[in-house]
Image (spheres, grey):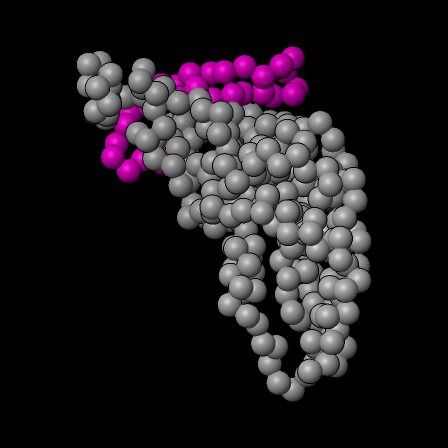
């Protein structure tokens, strides 16, 4: 105990994992269930759920796939923060009493236990027209990009669509019409891509009260992103570009002629 207070975190031999359970067929509301698990140096929170499911309670439901922070399916709420649990060690998430609490992503309907319904997340993503629209006649020479454009695209294209930012956004919680930080980050990626031919249409789509002007710049999306991306910065750029939409589109068309 003294070492915890001094900031020296000795790894305890066991930990209490509190997991939010909810089976809509039998439960009136969600509740927390505690499991005692052994702590080992590299055990992840996903390992913990897997151990519980295989050895203690096979009815526990959660999503996972890659186990390498790539697919985004294991995003959950750990001690109040959205995280990829395959990328989180158990020992790093214990409080001073040796406990960790895992809940499903907030603000989304619960299907069962830690599995949420992401339909609204994907519907909003579709609204951002996430596909590239290149010129009809593909030029023979390559599209040139500035280092700033490369950096902007690199930031956006590493999004793994885990939903951590979307479900951390209080504006999403209050207004399901808001397109959301994930979709706006994708829109930003396409708008900034010099190969795209419809930046004006995209800026008109997102330059609305359900788009960039609905964001309250609370920055939860930045805190929640497990890849360290900056959806709030992308939204700010889209706001500025939406003000000069026609000029931006003309400049893009001119550039593609060169
Ligand atoms: Fe794929 Fe965690 S299981 S990101």
x and y percent of residue 66 in the render?
46, 48
Q: Residue at x 77, y 58 (%)?
A: 245
Query: Is 107 inside the magenta-drawn segment?
Result: no
Say whether residue 150 is left or right of residue 10. Answer: right
Q: Answer whether residue 58 is visible to the viewer in this image.
A: no
Say whether residue 57 is left or right of residue 217. Answer: left
Looking at the image, residue 202 lies above or below residue 120: below
The span picked out in magenta is 16-44
Looking at the image, residue 133 lies above or below residue 229: below
Q: How many marks?
A: 0
Say whether residue 24 is left or right of residue 72. Answer: right
Q: Nearer the viewer, residue 19 or 157?
A: 157
x and y percent of residue 173 in the render?
67, 28
Q: Nearer the viewer, residue 23 or 82?
A: 82
Q: Answer whether residue 97 is visible to the viewer in this image.
A: yes
Query: Is 41 inside the magenta-drawn segment?
Result: yes
x and y percent of residue 163 in the render?
58, 40
Q: Residue at x 54, y 14 (%)?
A: 31
Looking at the image, residue 233 lies above or below residue 95: below
Q: Nearer the viewer, residue 134 or 112?
A: 134
Quadrant housing residue 12: top left
x and y percent of residue 99 in the render?
36, 19
Q: Residue at x 77, y 64 (%)?
A: 247
Q: Residue at x 65, y 69 (%)?
A: 194
Quadrant housing residue 201: bottom right
Q: Residue lying furthest bottom in this view? A: 140
Q: Quadrant of the C terminus?
A: bottom right
Q: Quadrant of the N terminus?
A: top left
């Amino acid at each position: 105990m003294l070492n915890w207070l001094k900031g020296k975190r000795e790894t305890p031999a066991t930990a209490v994992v509190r997991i939010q359970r909810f089976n809509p067929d039998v439960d009136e509301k969600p509740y927390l269930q505690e499991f005692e698990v052994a702590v080992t140096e590299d055990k992840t929170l996903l390992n913990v759920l897997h151990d519980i499911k295989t050895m203690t309670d096979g009815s526990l439901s959660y999503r996972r796939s890659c186990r390498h922070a790539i697919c985004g399916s294991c995003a959950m709420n750990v001690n109040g923060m959205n995280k990829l649990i395959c990328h989180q060690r158990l020992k790093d998430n214990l409080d001073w009493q040796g406990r960790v609490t895992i809940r499903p992503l907030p603000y989304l309907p619960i299907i069962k236990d830690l599995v949420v319904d992401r339909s609204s997340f994907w519907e909003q993503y579709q609204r951002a027209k996430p596909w590239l629209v290149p010129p009809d006649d593909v030029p023979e020479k390559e599209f040139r990009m500035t280092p700033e454009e490369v950096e902007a695209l690199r930031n956006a294209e590493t999004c793994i669509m885990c939903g951590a930012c979307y479900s951390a956004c209080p504006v999403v919680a209050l207004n399901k019409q808001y397109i959301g930080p994930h979709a706006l980050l994708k829109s930003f990626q396409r708008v900034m891509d010099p190969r795209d031919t419809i930046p004006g249409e995209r800026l008109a789509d997102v330059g609305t009260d359900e788009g960039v002007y609905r964001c309250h710049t609370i920055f939860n999306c930045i805190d929640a992103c497990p890849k360290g991306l900056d959806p709030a910065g992308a939204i700010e750029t889209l706001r500025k570009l939406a003000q000069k939409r026609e000029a931006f589109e003309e400049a893009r068309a001119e550039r593609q002629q060169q």
